[in-house]
Amino acid sequence: MSCIFCKIVSKEIPTKIIYENETVLAFNDINPMAPEHILVIPKRHIESIDDLSSNDKDITSSMFEAAREIANVRNLSEYGYRVIINNGKAAGQEVFHLHLHILGGKEKLGPMLAK
Ligand code: 5GP
Ligand code: ZN
């Protein structure tokens, strides 16, 4: 398995886990684009939203549940935060293991898309 996020799940790549339950885990992005930049991933390898099925509702709800809890614990909800999924090549997805970015901090984030 060459997927870098699967290697984080299997602990082959040691990474500080900041949230975990039986379905998802979360860790800091290696190249933060905001004061707080956290990734939430399903433990199961799913490439993108396009590969989800109606049987995966536990995964999608766990990802948002994790986002809410992380934002709460890290005080991001106080200031507001952005949640992004880059889905597919045109969206700039680089790691083809579904993940949600949580971006936040005290300062206002830039525009949603670079003009
Ligand atoms: P994408 O562009 O696919 O939406 O985002 C992939 C993200 O994964 C990027 O923000 C990148 O910095 C992050 N990333 C890539 N490899 C690693 C890694 O080995 N560890 C961590 N913590 N983040 C990574
Ligand atoms: Zn994977």
Image (cartoon, helix red, strand yellow):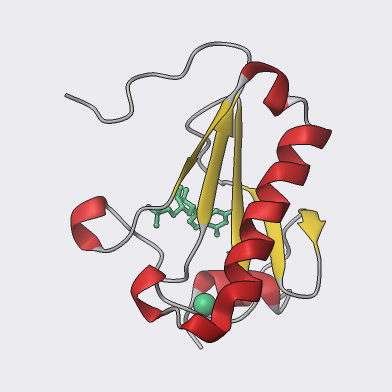
The residue depicted at 63 percent of the width and 53 percent of the height is 64
The residue depicted at 63 percent of the width and 13 percent of the height is 106
Task: Judge by depth and name the residue closer to the eye, 16 or 60.
Answer: 60
The residue depicted at 64 percent of the width and 63 percent of the height is 61
The quarter holding residue 110 reads top left
Depicted 65 relative to depicted 23: above or below: above
Task: Judge by depth and name the residue closer to the eye, 58 or 10.
Answer: 58
Q: In the image, is 88 to the left or to the right of 23?
A: left
**Residue 3: x %, y % from top left:** 48, 77
Extreme residue toward the front, this view: 54
Q: In the image, is 92 to the left or to the right of 82?
A: left
The residue depicted at 69 percent of the width and 26 percent of the height is 76
The quarter holding residue 93 reads bottom left
Q: In the image, is 55 to the left or to the right of 88?
A: right
**Residue 52: x %, y % from top left:** 44, 78
Task: Judge by depth and name the residue closer to the eye, 79 or 39.
Answer: 79
Task: Judge by depth and name the residue closer to the eye, 33 or 109.
Answer: 109
Q: In the image, is 16 to the left or to the right of 41?
A: right
**Residue 63: x %, y % from top left:** 63, 59
Depicted 29 relative to depicted 45: above or below: above
Q: How many marks?
A: 0
Extreme residue toward the top, this view: 107
**Residue 20: x %, y % from top left:** 80, 62
